[in-house]
Image (spheres, rainbow, N blue to C red):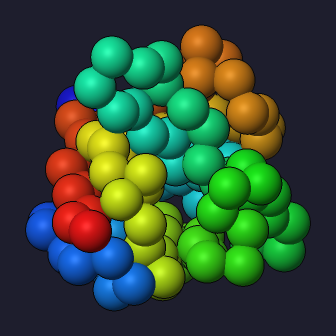
Amino acid sequence: QVQLVESGGGLVQAGGSLRLSCAASGRTFSSYARAWFRQAPGKEREFVAHIAWSGGSTYYTESVKGRFTISRDNAKNTVYLQMNSLKPEDTAVYYCAARPQVSVHAAQYGYWGQGTQVTVSS
């Protein structure tokens, strides 16, 4: 059974840092694009970042550029999201996802984790 599991969320003060991880099991995602999305209460799921299968191509939504870094370790079948200089508006449930090619559209992703809560206090 294919499963993606996020971890690393929690409560942090504004200006702090967190590193999220998403480990996959049941199949290898080495040849798949990986992405992070987030969803705040009452809002639609929002694209955050994606990374190509090779790890050489990354893309971020404007609000996190310069603060967040997406990376992957194909040997561990894991994708990461390093979040620095966190702001209260970053508060959301963060989800990892996978599909054959990169995309910013949540509906195009077929594999999802259960999400991990990130709360940033002011």
Residue at 48% x, 82% y: name it.
85
Where in the figure is residue 74, as x and y percent of width and height? Answer: 54, 72
* Above or below, comparing residue 30 to residue 35 in the picture: below
The reply to whether residue 98 is in sight is no
Q: Quadrant of the N terminus?
A: top left
Where in the figure is residue 53, as x and y percent of width and height? Answer: 73, 59
Where in the figure is residue 76, as x and y percent of width and height? Answer: 40, 76
- Quadrant hosting residue 6: bottom left
Side of 76 where 102 appears, left or right: right
In this view, the residue in front, 108 or 11, is 11
Side of 99 where 58 appears, left or right: right
In this view, the residue in front, 82 or 40, is 40
Considering every residue shown, the one lying at the far front of the view is: 122
Where in the figure is residue 72, as x and y percent of width and height? Answer: 56, 73
* Above or below, comparing residue 72 to residue 105 in the picture: below
Residue at 35% x, 33% y: name it.
40
Considering every residue shown, the one lying at the far right of the view is: 57
The reply to whether residue 117 is in sight is yes
Residue at 26% x, 68% y: name it.
122
Residue at 21% x, 58% y: name it.
119
